[in-house]
């Protein structure tokens, strides 16, 4: 049995109120992981070219601000 299958089986046995709490907890965990990945990408310079391209497009009038 994979970890995902074990997780799904355990989650399916939770009462509704615990399912919601676990869902919120998992969403927080996933968001934190995403933030760490983006931060690592920024610090490593992996996003520099994309950022420069976006800046250039904006300055050329080809993109609108957020």
Image (cartoon, grey):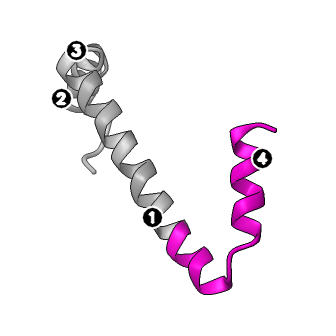
Residue under circle 1?
25
Residue under circle 2?
59
Residue 5, disc:
4
- Is residue 3 magenta-colored? yes
Percent position of residue 14, x then y? 68, 75
Q: Earlier in the sequence, mark 1 or mark 2?
A: 1
Residue in the picture at 22% in, 19% down: 52
3D distance between C-alphas at marks 2 and 4: 49 Å
Residue in the picture at 68% in, 53% down: 7
3D distance between C-alphas at marks 2 and 3: 25 Å
Q: Nearer the viewer, mark 4 or mark 1?
A: 4
3D distance between C-alphas at marks 4 and 1: 19 Å
Q: Earlier in the sequence, mark 2 or mark 4?
A: 4
Residue under circle 3?
44
Circles 4 and 3: CB atoms closer than 8 Å: no
> Tag 1, which secondary structure?
helix
Which range of residues does the magenta coloring cover? Answer: 1-22
């Amino acid at each position: 049995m994979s970890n995902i299958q074990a997780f799904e089986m355990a989650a399916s046995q939770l009462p509704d109120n615990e399912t919601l709490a676990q869902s919120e907890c998992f969403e927080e965990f996933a968001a934190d992981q995403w933030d760490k990945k983006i931060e690592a990408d920024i610090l490593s310079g992996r996003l520099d070219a994309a950022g420069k391209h976006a800046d250039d497009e904006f300055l050329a009038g080809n993109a609108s601000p957020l």
